[in-house]
Image: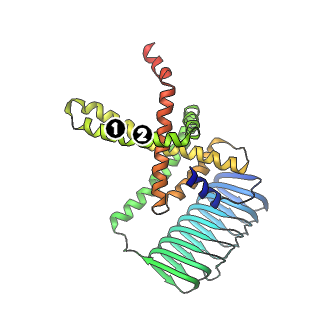
Amino acid sequence: MLILAVILAILLPAGVSALVTYNGGDVLIDRPVQDDIFATGGTVTIDAPIASLIAAGGMVTINAPVNGDVIVAGGTVTVNANIGGKVVAAGGTVDINKEVGTNVVVTGGTVTIGKSARISRDALISGGTVTNAGEVKGNLTVRAQSFTNTGTAGNLDVRLSEPRGDFSRIFAIFGVLFTIGMFILGLVLLRVVPAHFLHVEEEVRTAPFLKTVVGFVSLIVSFIVLIIASITVLLLPIALVLWMVFFIALILATLFVSMAFGRVIFQYLKKETSPWIMFTAGFIVLSLIFLIPFAGFIILVIAESLGFGAFLFTIRKDWNLIQKPAQA
């Protein structure tokens, strides 16, 4: 939780006092907004100056200045206007074509720093195909399969990897679709069983360190016990059912943590909003964090352990209630 809090403090805008939310199929902001914006939609288009932006959508396009930071995830992300703060982006295609006031952190299939782009500090880019035709005044760090550099950088650090095979591309596509499916599942649970979902999320926020340790140990023990049960013919039917429960708990674990993390975000912003917006914010930020090499995997393990531990504590606390229908 400390690691997540530090990353959150780095990513989110400083001095935030308000937040305006937008959602829908197509989100168009064509009037100046002096507050910080959180937007989700099929397309998100910024055509008027705003304070800062957190957005997720199939296509996110910024055509007007942003005074603060931009944190976005989308199929296509295009920055065509000056950004006063940092840019943190993840997408299939990411294009940065104007000035960025501080740093740029981008991961995507195709990433382009255009001729008109000026990055005042450092840029950290991970992608399949990366092109730099602009100016990076600080360090330009690139991890990609292919890199074309016709621009300039204060210091250049490039490491190229082998092109992905067909299996790797299929796996990457599956990962994107699975992430979208997880997001939809979280929204469905909030809609269908909001009380139960929020009850487990409350457990996530209560003694998180204890629940992370308990969850981690329980994951290891449960896995070993299920393996042993699976090789015993007599216990195999029970093992199959328990495997199903085990995987359901694993899938739901990060959703509970996303909800809790989203609540932390809005507490940091000192803004009241609906649970689904909290969940969306937490899910997006955690998904971006999970993409960080090595550290992202460690944080994923922490999130799984915390969510699993909270799930177990909820069952333990409500065990009498769970037994009542069977005893009636």
Left/right placement of residue 80 relative to residue 146 reads: right
Instruction: Please provide percent x and percent y for residue 89.
Output: 58, 65
**What x and y, as percent, mark residue 145?**
42, 75
Q: Amino acid at mark 1?
A: Trp
Q: Residues within 10 Å of mark 1 (few under 14, many from 20)?
A: some
Q: Residue 69 is drawn in which quadrant?
A: bottom right
Instruction: Report the label total.
Output: 2
Circles 1 and 2 in contact, beta carbons < 8 Å: no
Q: Is residue 126 above or below residue 171?
A: below
Q: CA distance from mark 1 to mark 2?
A: 9 Å
Residue 236 image position (x, y, % from top left): 25, 33
At 58% from the left and 83% from the top, the residue drawn is: 153
Tell me where residue 108 appears, x and y as whole percent.
51, 67
The label on residue 243 is 1
Label whose residue precedes the other's in the sequence (1 or 2): 1
Left or right of 72, for residue 52 = right
Q: Nearer the viewer, residue 14 or 324?
A: 14
* The disc label shown at residue 130, or none: none
Tell me the amino acid under the disc marked 2.
Ile
Task: Say which residue label 2 marks.
Answer: 248
